[in-house]
Amino acid sequence: MHSPVDSSSAPKLVLYSYWKSSCSWRVRFALNLKGLSYEYRAVNLAKGEQFTSEFGRLNPLRYVPVLVDGDVVVSDSFAILLYLEEKYPRKALLPADPQLRAINLQAASIVSSSIQPLHMLSLLKYIEEKVGPEEPQAWAHVHIEKGLLALEKLLKDCAGPYATGEEVYMKNTRTEFIEPMNILVYPDSCKYAAAEADVFLAPQIEVAAKRFNVDMSKFPTLHAVYESCNALPEFQASVPDRQPDAAH
C-alpha cells in the first residue's frame, strides 16, 4: 500500500467519469468532501466510449469510474474510496470508531453490491430483451426497495442528519466551487460528520427516487440523510447535471 501523502504535494488526480453514472457520482462527492482537485475526463457510455482500447487498458471491465493518481490506476468506486482514505487521510470519510466504521462499510457494500448492480443499464436492457419492455422497471423497483429497507434498518438507530453522524459544520470557513475546473476549495478548519456511507447513499437515493420512482417516505431515515447531503455544496457540485459532459 502507498503511504499517506499531503494532497497539496500529490500529482493531480484524473477521474474517468460519466455524468449519469451513480458509481462515478460517489467518487465525485467523496473527492469534493476531501477537498481534492481532479481533472474530469468524460467517458460517454451511451456512445460506447468505454469500449475503446485506451479505456480498456485502464479497466478491462470497461466500467466507470476509474481514478488515475500518477502511475496508480484504480477502478471500482469502493476500491477508489478506500484508496483515497489511505493515500489522502485529511478529511477522513471513515470514522475511527470500529463499530461506526463497520456500519459505514456495510452500508456502502449494500449499495455497491446489492442495489446498484441490479439496476445497471446493461442488465435492464437484457431483461427487456428476454422478458418484455415493462419488466425492467418492475425488477429494478423491487430490488432497490429491498436494499433500501435493509439500509433503513441498519441505520435507524445510529443516524443523525447523516448516516452515522450528528452534524456537518464549518467553523469560520467559506467553501468555494470553481466550476470550469471542477475544484472545491476548503480552508483547513472545515470538519465533516458526513462519512463514506453518505457518499454511497445520497446518489443512490436520488437515482431511486427520480429514475425509478421509489417512494422515499417509506424510508424516513434514509430520506433525512439524503436531505442533509443534498444541502451540502460538495454534493451539489457532484450532481450529474453540473458535470462537463452533462446533456441538457
Image (tube, rainbow, N blue to C red):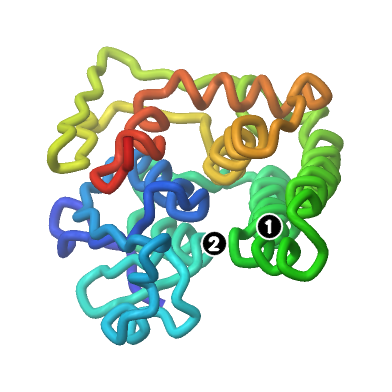
Residue 22 at x, y percent in the picture: 51, 49
Q: Which residue is mark 1?
A: 109
Residue 37 at x, y percent in the picture: 21, 48
Residue 180 at x, y percent in the picture: 13, 38
Q: Which residue is mark 2?
A: 78
Looking at the picture, which amino acid does disc 1 mark? Ser
- The residue shown at (44%, 63%) is 80
The residue carrying pointer 1 sits among few (fewer than 14), some (14 to 19) or many (20 or more) residues within 10 Å by Cα, namely some
> Which of 114 and 211 lies nearest the eye of the viewer?
211
Q: Earlier in the sequence, mark 2 or mark 1?
A: 2
- The residue shown at (62%, 20%) is 161
Quadrant containing the C terminus is: top left
Position of 240 with respect to 96 (left or right) is left
- In what element is the residue under mark 1? helix
Residue 217 image label: none
Q: Residue 243: name its quadrant.
A: top left
- Alpha carbon separation for disc pair 2 and 1: 8 Å
Residue 71 at x, y percent in the picture: 23, 79
Seen as rendered, the residue at the extreme top is 172
The residue carrying pointer 2 sits among few (fewer than 14), some (14 to 19) or many (20 or more) residues within 10 Å by Cα, namely some
Quadrant containing the N terminus is: bottom left
